[in-house]
Image (tube, grey):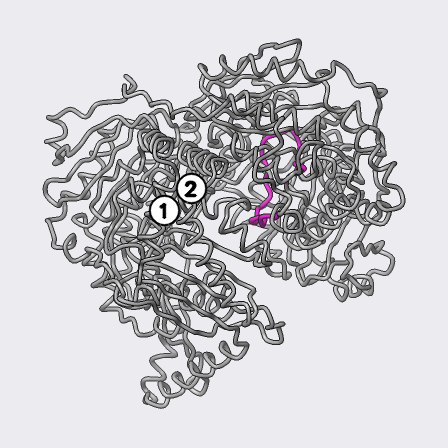
Amino acid sequence: MARATTLFRSPRRISRFALPSSSSCSFSSASAPRNHRHRPTPDVPTAPSLLRSHIRLLPSSFHPHLTTHFRCLSSRAVPASSDTPPSECSEVKDEVLDKLGFEKVTEEYIGECKSKALLFRHKKTGAQVISMSNDDEEKVFSIIFRNPLMDSTGISQILQRSVYCGSRKYPVKNPFEEVIGGTLGNFSEKFIYSDRTCYVVTSTHTKDFYNLVDMNLDAVFFPKCVEDLQIFRQEGWHFELNDPSGDISYKGAVFNQMKEYYSQPDPISILKKTTRQAIFPETTYGFDCAGDPKVIPQLSFREFKEFHRKYYHPSNARIWFYGDDDPTERLRILSEYLDMFDASSAPNESRIKPQKLFSEPVRIFKKYPSIPFADFKKKNMVCLSWLLCDGPLDMETERTIQVLLHLMSGTIFSPLKRILLENGFVDVFIEVSVELLQPLFSVGVMSVSHDDILKVEELVMSTLKKLAKGGFDSDTLEVSLNGMEFNLREYNDEPYTRGVSLLVRSMDKWIFDMDPFEPLKYGKFLTALKSRIQKEGSKAVFSPLIEKFILHNPHRVVVEMQPDPQKASRAEKAEKEILGKVKASLTNKDLAGLVRATQELRLKQATPDPPEAMRSVPSLSLQDIPKEPTTVPKEVDYINGVKVLQHDLFTNDVLYTDIVFDMSSSVKQELIPLVPLFCYALQNMNTKDTCFVGLRHLIVRKTGGISIESMIRCTEDPCCHIIVRGKAMAKRAEDLFHLINYLLQEVQFTDHRWFKQLVSHAIVQYQQSAELEGQNIIALRMDAKLNVFGWIREQMCGISHLEFLQALEKKVDQDWERISSSLEEIRKSLFTRKGCIINMTTEGKNLAKSEQFVGKFLDLLPGNSPCATTTWNARLPCVNEAIVVPTPLNHVGKSVNIHDTGYRVNGRTDVISTFLVGARTWLPDRTVISGAVYASYRFDNYSGACSFLPSGDTNLLKTLDRYDNTGDFLRQLEMDNDTLKKAIIQALKNDSCEYLDPKAKGYNSLEQYLTGVTEEERKRRHEEMLSTSLKDFKEFADAFDAVKDKGVVVAMGAPNDVHAALKDRPDFFQVKTPFTRAEF
């Protein structure tokens, strides 16, 4: 499993917040930029927890009505991709190739990713280079070094951090931190594995891309860290001593990180790590590539330098290029670096040695550190693992095993996953690790009582034996083959884009000197596998694999882990004893030297880089930025009187569709809070013919998924829609639209007990997510006090929605008839052709073929709603509020309406917002001083809401003073041209220059259409951002000061912190306690 370090990523356009995730409610202004900082939103489980009590309802075969309809739509062979390369792919001429010092090894066109693929070899050093040419505007570069480990000192992680701390051409402390503001780069990460280190950068801008490529090449081949002991100490480890009479401690970025991790590890991670150590006792995979804090201090600077010398050499390098840039220029850049080296023996020294297979199974018992005083009764863990073979698998066998894994555990309906769920084991992972030299199959179960460990083992083994004996039914096969084909076609390995996903797939074989292009080709394999299953049956295909690689495989390890609340404290005590002995062995002179070294390192860290060094860091100029925003192809047509938006984009024959229903004039105001739960219920309640579990199973058999969500955008009038989003292989467009219609029209709101469980589940999920979504919650609450648009989205996604759910839960039993009637009224109001819009994204040939199925779908919809037209006009009282939550993390925000002054939010305002939340500018510096973790600034282009949202503040009121001083800060601001330029570039990257994959492009175009954002408006905003000046900052300051005292404040904090705030300012807040565990 790789560990990744992220330097920069283009932020997602919007975070969706609503607690049943299947009915998510997105919210923002119609404008593009979202200048708030994001933290990852946790996956909100909807199926396992809700399905356990109903899992046995799944019939062995579905209702004849459904089965009959889909039997005629049986799976067909995967269409062969075109073998003809696009004519626009540039050629690298032989004479140029020879001049640059390369030779061509292989060349082919890979239709599955629409790319011309070439493998080159640098003749002098043997460096291998893959050059993938296509029409993807996102260009990807990566350099990979194979580096097996001999211990758990964390040397690969320390080195991958250290090489980014300055280099020959870029001699600043952190050039990649400095370059962020001046780049349109979308993604920069460093991955470490137990057998390799991988550096990746991407950008849509060619000059910018080559700047990042050059910085990476200089960093890995000529880093300052191999000459500078202080970098090793800073990034790895060192003894820290502030005073000769004090205690010595270990410090260092990697040491600190791993010490924290080992003291409070994620249970799944520690179980997987322990399993790897047990199953690979003799190879690199048994070591912790990130470092064990007990072992990290054993690493010497000499070993560190030798590791770089041996493995970070062109002879040991695998270099990847992807995108629409010139393949000749790629090689020219590389030759400048590679020609400086001679060949080395690194390829032989870095070969990964295989683990010798065991002759009999092994059982391991270990303890893991846990939180003291936790309930330990069901905190044990167990993992059954098999090392599948003594070397790499061929691609066909590996992929067949991956299909087998999906058959056994890919969905909640899969037999191995299902048997564990039915027996109450819900915290489970089942995986095949194919990135290793020898693939590993594991079944891990957390939250198990000690008495149930043997039961888990028996369930797993008996299920595997049963599957080997009986095979799989046709429905399960269809689900797995459909799921695998989607995974292969979409290249949707979140959070990676297509080019990075292809890199990762290719690298997993390339690193072992296997064909790097084979993992990218899957069409023939899927066709052959389907044909083989049809001829021989699933048992003949999969049973031999289960028997050979699992049941008859003696290399099996069972790892049993038990929580130990004292383990971390014992480790801390042992560390102090070691450090005590170290100090006792030092002379007074040694201690004085250690104090001096500590001070010198801190001084270096605090000393700014000299201006001449800073000028070495490349940056785009405003002249380099495109003069117009990126556009998406869009054709507007009509089918049966309904508007259809079509986007002709390469999606690898996947059809993405969004069916939009207008709710802004059809749903009664009092029913708005019920709409998210209505969407959730549509996907989690039964129809007349089948239970919802069966319907879900049918959906995953025939499509790539269907979701229903609400979209709320602020325009001159509130823009509110329900959007049904679905995807399927283009050949199954008929299935997709039929299933969507069946879901919308046939789900019955009759089971009030199950509906009550859905309500209860939604309440729990909302409360559990409150801490992570605190900023969004208070932003919703503030907007609801300023305008109708804000009120609507708060009713559907905010605290008001939670209060509605809590009241609804109490009413379900007594007033179910009225509630059921309201749900039906929403359905009749929404799902009509009036106001409906269809949005489709796929290749042109598929768009044309899908139109007939769109027509059939629309024919089944009513023409108009029988309900009367309605209007909405409401907002919350404009008073300050404090929402009490049972969490230590506080949030506080203040919002004003900047439009009240006559000022209008525009593209220049986005630049100002970007500057305010940017690194080392006003808000982060001040909020860190006052105790806040981070802050964001949000502008709503239509309503004029201007919101300040610090997070993690221990003092709920102090930081608000900073917000009120925004005007003074901007008026006194002295900004050089470089700082202004970087703010402009970052604002553009988050808006009109943002890279989106085809699916996101189609949906983003739909959003713009629904909110009335024209290409002319986008161009105007783009030009406004490019022309931003310091004068615009001053004008905003004046407008802000005119309304800052008219704002509204909403806080969200722990009871003690709310008490403290009210003590300082009595009656400043009205207090709300909507969370059941919050006491005030």
For image coordinates 23% across by 61% down, the residue present is 307
- Does residue 467 show up? yes
Compared with 244, 97 (above or below) is above
Mark 2 closeness class: few <14, some 14–19, many ≥20 residues within 10 Å: many
Under circle 2, the secondary element is: strand
Instruction: Give the Cα distance between marks 2 and 1.
Output: 42 Å
Discs 2/1, front? 1
Mark 1 closeness class: few <14, some 14–19, many ≥20 residues within 10 Å: many
Residue at the far right in the pictured view: 814
Instruction: Choose between 638 and 924: the one closer to the eye.
Output: 638
- Does residue 184 show up? no
Q: Does the magenta stretch include residue 775?
A: no
Look at the image and tell me in which quarter the N terminus lies: bottom left
**Mark with earlier residue (2, 1):** 2
**660 left or right of 1056 in image:** left
Residue type at numbered disc 1: Ser
- Pinpoint residue 712: horizontal percent, then vertical percent: 70, 32
Compared with 936, 458 (above or below) is below
Under circle 1, the secondary element is: helix
Instruction: Choose between 524 and 572: the one closer to the eye.
Output: 524
Q: Which mark is residue 543?
A: 1
- Pinpoint residue 1064: horizontal percent, then vertical percent: 80, 63
- Pinpoint residue 651: horizontal percent, then vertical percent: 44, 26
Q: Residue 834 carries which label?
A: none
Q: Which mark is residue 187?
A: 2
Q: Is the magenta stretch mostly helix, strand or loop?
A: loop
Residues shaded magenta? 22-45
Q: Is residue 43 magenta?
A: yes
Find residue 565 and report its image quarter. bottom right
Q: Total label count? A: 2
Look at the image and tell me in which quarter the C terminus lies: bottom right
- Pinpoint residue 311: horizontal percent, then vertical percent: 21, 56
